């Protein structure tokens, strides 16, 4: 049956968990019955209750094994090559049988493990959010605020450079990681008057060329920086 290429991997896992749960539950009942009989004689009704409880807990614990394997990043649940019976099925059956025999302890232990994993995940998420906030704060500290662009100074000794080169130089030679259109316009206008809207148009062209990158600050102002890479 297992060598037939049409067998269903998940059906096999289901059957393993079911029969391992039943067998492990029976073994658990035998263990509990021996312990009880060692101290005092149990009634038939009491024995039936233990029998049902052992089977239910055994099957439940067996079907929780996939969750346990996921928490330890096991590959036992992976589908084997088509048409083969992988020995991982036997290992998986062993896990299910052990979980069923020790059903109560296994369920309690798995619950604690899942709760700890959830707590660690939440803690990691909080750390990531705090780091993101710190990065944004640093970027804001190194982002130039919007200023008045009316200051214009002529400099006839200015070396002949293209507007794009002068924009790159204006962004690179200040303490800010990101610069505003007004700040860049002010720097350019110290050497040669240039309208702010013309600067904005050239900046957008450079963004489209992949030479600059943008971000929007908390006031909704578009800021520009040299694009890495």
Image (tube, rainbow, N blue to C red):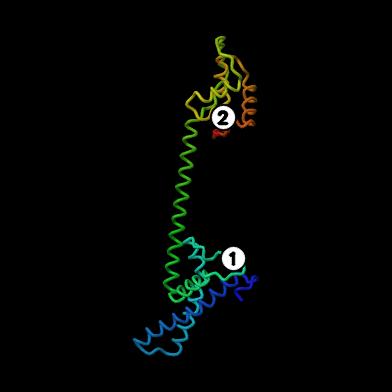
Residue at coordinates 47% horizontally, 36% vertically from top-left? 137
The x, y position of residue 166, in whole percent, is: 57, 20
Q: Is residue 117 above or below residue 174?
A: below
Which quadrant does the N terminus fall into?
bottom right
Label 1: few (<14), some (14–19) or many (≥20) C-alpha neighbours in 10 Å: few
Furthest toward the top, the residue is 156
Q: Is residue 218 above or below residue 61?
A: above
* Residue 81: numbered disc: 1
* Image coords of residue 194 (percent x, y): 62, 17
State the residue at coordinates (62%, 31%): 207
Name the element at disc 1.
loop
Residue 183 x %, y % = 54, 23
Placement of 115 over or under 26, stated as above or below: above
Q: How many marks?
A: 2
**At 49% across and 80% down in the image, what residue appears?**
23
Spatial distance from mark 2 to mark 1, Cα to Cα?
53 Å
Labels 2 & 1 near each other (Cβ < 8 A): no
Relative to 118, is 220 on the left or the right? right
Pick the quarter of the image with the C terminus: top right
| Residue 146: image tag | none
Seen from the viewer's position, the closer of residues 1 and 37 is 1
| Residue occupying the far left of the picture | 39
Residue 132: where, in percent of width, then height?
A: 48, 42
Structural crowding at the residue carrying mark 2, measured as other residues with C-alpha within 10 Å and reported as few (<14), some (14–19) or many (≥20) = many
Looking at the rendered structure, which numbered label has been put on residue 224?
2
Q: Nearer the viewer, mark 2 or mark 1?
A: 1
Task: Name which quarter of the figure residue 3 lies in.
Answer: bottom right
**Mark 2: which secondary structure?**
strand
């Amino acid at each position: 049956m297992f060598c037939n290429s049409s067998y269903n991997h998940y059906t096999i896992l289901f059957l393993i968990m079911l029969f391992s749960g039943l067998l492990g539950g029976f073994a658990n009942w035998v263990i509990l019955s021996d312990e009880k009989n060692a101290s005092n004689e149990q009634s038939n009704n009491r024995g039936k209750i233990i029998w049902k409880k052992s089977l239910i807990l055994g099957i439940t614990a067996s079907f929780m094994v996939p969750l346990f394997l996921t928490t330890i990043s096991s590959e036992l649940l992976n589908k084997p090559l088509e048409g083969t019976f992988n020995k991982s099925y036997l290992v998986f059956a062993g896990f299910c049988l052990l979980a069923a025999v020790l059903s109560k302890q296994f369920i309690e232990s798995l619950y604690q493990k899942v709760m700890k994993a959830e707590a660690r995940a939440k803690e990691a998420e909080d750390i990531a959010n705090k780091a993101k906030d710190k990065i944004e704060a640093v970027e804001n500290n190194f982002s130039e605020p919007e200023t008045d662009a009316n200051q214009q100074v002529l400099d006839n000794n200015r070396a002949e450079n293209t507007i794009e080169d002068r924009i790159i130089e204006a962004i690179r030679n200040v303490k800010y990681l990101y610069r505003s259109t007004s700040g860049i316009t002010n720097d350019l206008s110290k050497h040669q008057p240039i309208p702010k809207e013309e600067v904005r148009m050239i900046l957008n062209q450079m963004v489209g060329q992949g030479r600059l990158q943008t971000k929007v600050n908390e006031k909704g102002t578009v800021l520009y920086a040299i694009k890495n890479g």
